[in-house]
Image (cartoon, rainbow, N blue to C red):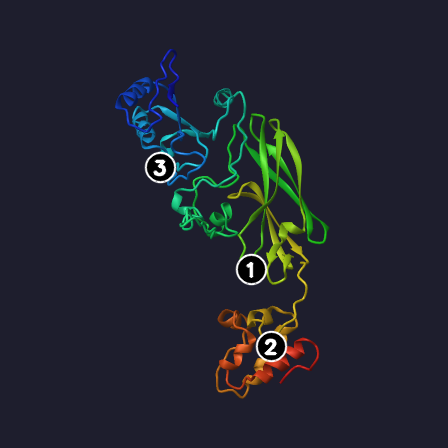
């Protein structure tokens, strides 16, 4: 890991040691080598002492001596490109503001040097995509409040909201989003067409065009968003993707298939994978934060009709096509003679008491008895006429 200046014949001295001990002389030599250069390459990253198997990192910062080197070289005024070598993400703000570009190399293998040279000199076009989110700070991580745990136990408290699912659901700003990646060319998306291929199954077809002057690859990603869900879900989830290689000006028709599991969630109540009937939005783009095309589809759903009981909540009753009208009509009849002023607007009832079991209503409303509740349940089950 060392700075490299583009002046012919200039030296490329190391700017720091791998033990993390500051060395002012090395920094001075690096600054001198970079002085007057039009382009400076700084190879930074995490040494073995900062990350390894068998122990966990406590921060995501680059070593302090490397940041000191970057700050010193930035004072020279040359354009800086940072090349990173690290096994896991590092915090890039605010130091990335002092660079012209950052090339994330991750853990470079035996051929890492030649691969980086091909990318830096434009022989090859970088076409990678992030498989994780790069946060602005460690505290933004969904697992920050739960990791590393204690007494030999770790609680994975983020549940479904792992990685981008949490950042996107909360709308939290990030340094680089899941799926992000740049190259020496650019791509456009157009002509989205969605066809239904079966129950709760669809195929999304669209055109990807290389609008730049270099051959390259694009990773088209399809995320599914459910506007209204019975259970809390991530705001969107990656369900399909495809990498296409295109010459300058070239286009490709990409088709991504979605099956029933693409829309489903695990329902503890139903004891299986469930698709809610209703609308879903298909979002197609170059990352979780770079959506280019959208389309709405409607799923018939897979949930079996659930028998309403006295322990079903008011929200469940109101959402049921049979129970909703029965409950509204029954409450209107029972409250005609009640001195308690209660609105029968379904949205207001749902907002106030959606989670309240129907059996608890007699405790709150005068004139409503448990016999009324039993009759209402029987009516919903089709065994008795509507209670009045």
Q: Is residue 368 left or right of residue 32?
A: right
Q: Earlier in the sequence, mark 2 or mark 1?
A: 1
Coordinates of residue 375 in the picture (x, y in percent): 63, 82
Numbered disc 2: secondary structure: helix
Q: Earlier in the sequence, mark 3 or mark 2?
A: 3
Q: Which mark is residue 327?
A: 2
Q: Are marks 3 and 1 in contact (CB under 8 Å)?
A: no
Q: With respect to residue 347, does 225 lie above or below?
A: above
Numbered disc 3: secondary structure: loop
Q: Nearer the viewer, residue 165 or 120?
A: 165
Q: Gap in Å between the C-alphas at discs 3 and 2?
A: 58 Å
Q: Which mark is residue 221?
A: none
Specify the quadrant of the image occupied by residue 214: top right
Specify the quadrant of the image occupied by residue 334: bottom right
Q: Gap in Å between the C-alphas at discs 3 and 1?
A: 38 Å
Q: Which mark is residue 231?
A: 1
Q: Earlier in the sequence, mark 3 or mark 1?
A: 3
Residue reaching furthest left?
24
For image coordinates 37% across by 40% down, the residue present is 59
Quadrant placement of the C terminus: bottom right
Q: Which residue is mark 3?
A: 94
Coordinates of residue 300 in the picture (x, y in percent): 68, 58
Q: With respect to residue 104, does 140 lie above or below?
A: below
Numbered disc 1: secondary structure: loop
- Crowding at mark 1 (Cα within 10 Å: few <14, some 14-19, many 20+): few
Quadrant placement of the N terminus: top left
For image coordinates 39% across by 17% down, the residue present is 6
Coordinates of residue 171 in the picture (x, y in percent): 46, 50
Coordinates of residue 72 in the picture (x, y in percent): 29, 27
Q: Gap in Å between the C-alphas at discs 2 and 1?
A: 23 Å
Q: With respect to residue 150, does 341 lie above or below?
A: below
Q: Nearer the viewer, residue 370 or 238?
A: 370
């Amino acid at each position: 890991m060392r700075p490299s200046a583009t002046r012919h014949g200039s030296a490329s001295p190391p700017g720091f040691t791998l033990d993390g001990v500051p060395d002012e002389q090395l920094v001075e030599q690096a600054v001198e080598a970079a002085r007057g250069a039009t382009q400076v390459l700084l190879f930074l990253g995490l040494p073995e002492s900062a990350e390894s198997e068998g122990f966990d990192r406590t921060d995501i910062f680059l070593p302090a001596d490397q940041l000191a080197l970057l700050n010193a070289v930035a004072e020279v005024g040359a354009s800086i490109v940072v090349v990173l070598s690290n096994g896991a993400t590092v915090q890039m703000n605010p130091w990335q503001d002092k660079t012209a570009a950052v090339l994330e190399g991750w853990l470079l293998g035996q051929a890492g040097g030649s691969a980086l040279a091909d990318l830096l000199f434009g022989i090859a076009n970088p076409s990678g995509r992030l498989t994780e989110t790069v946060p602005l700070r460690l505290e933004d991580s969904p697992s920050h409040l739960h990791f590393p745990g204690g007494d030999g136990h770790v609680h994975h408290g983020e549940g479904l909201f792992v990685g981008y699912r949490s950042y996107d659901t909360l709308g939290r700003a990030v340094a680089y989003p899941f799926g992000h990646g740049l190259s020496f060319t650019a791509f456009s998306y157009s002509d989205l067409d969605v066809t239904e291929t079966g129950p709760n199954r669809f195929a999304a077809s669209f055109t990807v065009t290389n609008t730049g002057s270099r051959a390259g690859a694009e990773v088209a990603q399809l995320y599914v968003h459910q506007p209204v869900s019975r259970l809390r879900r991530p705001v969107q989830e990656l369900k399909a993707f495809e990498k296409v290689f295109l010459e300058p000006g070239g286009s490709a028709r990409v088709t991504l298939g979605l099956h029933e599991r693409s829309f489903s969630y695990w329902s503890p109540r139903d004891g299986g994978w469930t698709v809610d009937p209703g609308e879903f939005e298909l979002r197609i783009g170059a990352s979780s934060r770079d959506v280019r095309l959208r389309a709405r589809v409607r799923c018939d759903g897979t949930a079996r009709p659930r028998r309403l009981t006295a322990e079903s909540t008011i929200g469940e009753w109101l959402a049921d096509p049979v129970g909703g009208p029965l409950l509204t009509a029954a409450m209107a009849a029972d409250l005609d003679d009640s001195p308690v002023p209660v609105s029968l607007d379904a949205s207001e009832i749902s907002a106030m008491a959606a989670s309240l079991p129907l059996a608890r209503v007699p405790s709150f409303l005068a004139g409503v008895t448990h016999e009324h509740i039993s009759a209402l349940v029987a009516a919903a089950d089709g065994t008795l006429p509507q209670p009045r």
